[in-house]
Image: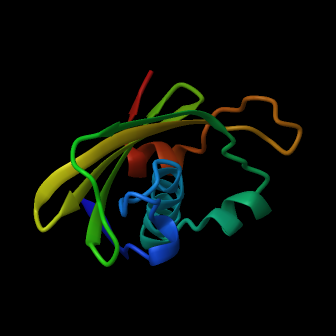
Amino acid sequence: MFRHRVKVRYAETDQMGIVHHSVYAVYFEEARVEYMRHIGKPYGELEREGILLPLLELHVRFIKPARFEDVLEIEVSPLIKGVRLFVDYTVYREGEKIAEGRTVHAFTGPDLRPMRPPENLREIFGSEP
């Protein structure tokens, strides 16, 4: 299990003093990028190998608001299905779940045509047919 910590910055909050909904996409991306680095397969390395992961879908369910200076932990859980990478995220504040979401990516080459993910990533992430 991988968790990434972020501290809410003032610029990420709205007039109501809560984290703006659009910021969760940034938090998810930051956590996903750090996860890839953690497993020894940084995004830059994938791109140099000709593997891209364009975003197909983004979903977020908000449970409780996050506010300025909250420290959030974002749990990352990936799974490969066919040529798609599904990444589930759970956002915690002091151990309490405050949001959850998912991004869906396609494995593609530089031409953006779908491609089968490398076997080593299928092993690391787990996969379904």
Q: Residue furthest front?
A: 15
Q: Quadrant of the C terminus?
A: top left
Q: Residue at x 46, y 54 (%)?
A: 20
Give the percent coordinates (x, y) of residue 52: 72, 48
Please state the horizontal and vertical placement of residue 27, each as a whole percent of the image.
46, 60
The front one of 5 and 70 is 70
- In percent of the image, x 53 and y 44: which residue is there? 119
- In terms of depth relative to the viewer, which is nearer, 67 or 84? 67
- The answer, for residue 86, to whether it is visible in the render is no
Residue 50 in the image: state x and y as whole percent.
Answer: 79, 52
Determine the residue positioned at 52% across, 51% down: 25
Percent coordinates x, y for residue 114 in the rendering: 73, 29
Q: Is residue 92 left or right of residue 33?
A: left
Quadrant location, the N terminus = bottom left
Figure label count = 0
What's the residue at 22%, 42% (across, down)? 63
Q: Is residue 41 above or below residue 115?
A: below
Asked whether residue 21 is in view, the answer is yes
* Residue 119 against residue 18 in the figure, above or below: above
- Identity of the residue furthest to the left in this view: 95
